Image (cartoon, helix red, strand yellow):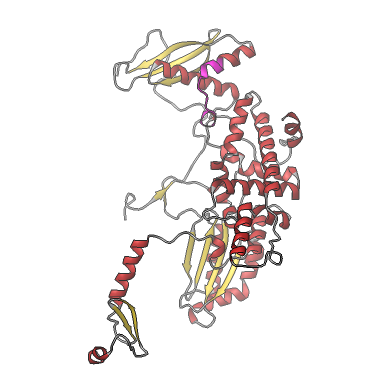
Amino acid sequence: MTARGTPSRFLQSVLHNGVGRYVCQLKRISLIFSKKGQGSLGVRDFIEEGVVDFAKNNPGTVVYISPQSCRIPKIVAEYLNGNVKEETVTNKASQEIAELITKLSNQSGLDIIRIRKPFHTDSPSIQGQWHPFTNRPPRLCIVFIL
Amino acid sequence: MAACRALVSRAVLPLHYHHVCRGVMLTHIREKKRWMKAYTLIMERKRKMEGPPPPKPRSQQPNFDYHAEVEAFSARLQESFSLELLKTAFVNVCYLRSEEERRRALGLDLETTTLNLKDNGELCVHGQQFTKAFLSDWCRGSFPSLPQEGVAAIVGHLTGSEVMCHVARNLAVEDLTMSAEFPVPDEILQGTFFAVIGALEQSSGSVRAGLFIRDFLVTQLIVKDLFDMWKVVDPMGLLVKELTCKGIALPEPRLIRSAGASTVLPLYFVGLYSDRKLLAQGPGETVLAAEEEAARVALRKLYGFTENRRPWDYTAPHEQLQKPSAQALTSE
């Protein structure tokens, strides 16, 4: 739709992450898959090969593996700011799932919507923001009637 | 099929007929179900009447392992907590009380089923003292000309329940807190966060705890203005006091600029001059408001809390922390 019809936000970070120390924003990732279904083949392969390495490389994220009888395998990612993101991974290859999980771990939990400006600053002006009276010579009794 | 159903009396139902409620009877057929629409509408009406379900704590939802979560909490913050202390920090008194009441209500024998958990009261007090001491020292170090009330106001704001609960919620402390009610009330969450800081100080020492407070609480000062946190009723009086202490001449207000005096949005700039040199100028809608704003701008310049000040350097780990707790605890 249009920019006004869809939600948007400004560029921001959760709790000024990165200013002090960097905290990985992904707190929990759950792999929900089926033990026998053919859509979960990629997830099962990923669990055999790559999930232990992922868990070792990201000690701040808890990885839950839950085999259930479900038709569509899902990855549920929970972030520190409370947002929960669900992705279906039916018929995805193990490599694609690995890339998806790396992408999820690099995201902050903020919504993926249009970002109004690709920049943000906390100190927009060093010498003071310009206003029409800056650099005007102050003569006695100078009065503007607008 | 219809004849079958007509013969059925209410008292005796064949095995595969099931009354859900008045107006909806389930029969097991493989075709399009005639009861589905009525059932769905009834459930929708029930859901609209009851409203949304009450929120459940994360520990009662599927996929939650407490020990793993606590370990991940400590790894995520790049701190090595002692896990015992950290688990104690999350246990609140209200939780212990409610658990004991529940066990008593269930009729369990008190001796065999006493909880072995200690509550976080001590850790909370310890953490609160350490945090306030560290933040006061930090404030005095980075804004040396700020008076005691200003320092107290900033520390009060940073250790107040709003900022602490905001930080705690975004660090997933609420998931791990054990408390009687859910959603966790602000005071209990604030107490738990203080207890976590206390646990960190006892496990890793005061330097690491100081770095933790710097990285998570001091960053909350980033876009804040001094007088948002410190309510000053008479900025001009305070400015006069400050200047007399320093021995500088008293400020004289002069109208510098004005525009639109007879319109609905007038603008006046008042400058404060001490000894014929400009201290600060400030805008306002009336001359009095402009004078007050000019006094506030002058105070901000004096205390070094302007918007364009040099930002705090978060990369240097040790040089800026100079024995935090010793000074503050002896002076207070």
At 58% across and 51% down in the image, what residue appears? B171
At 65% across and 45% down in the image, what residue appears? B194
> Residue B310: where, in percent of width, then height?
60, 31
Please tell me which residue lies in front, B73 or A18. Answer: B73
Is-magenta flag for residue B163?
Answer: no
Q: Quadrant of the C terminus of chain B?
A: top right
Principal secondary structure, stretch drawn in magenta: helix
At 55% across and 64% down in the image, what residue appears? B60
Is-magenta flag for residue B238?
Answer: yes
Please tell me which residue lies in front, B25 or A33. Answer: B25
Position above or below: A33 against B204: below
Please tell me which residue lies in front, B252 or A4. Answer: B252
> Residue A134: in sight, yes or no?
no
Q: Which residues are magenta?
A: B227-239
> Residue A126: where, in percent of width, then height?
52, 29
> Residue B314: in sight, yes or no?
yes
Please tell me which residue lies in front, B89 or B141. Answer: B89
Position above or below: A140 against B286: above
Position above or below: B318 against B75: above
> Residue B286: where, in percent of width, then height?
38, 18
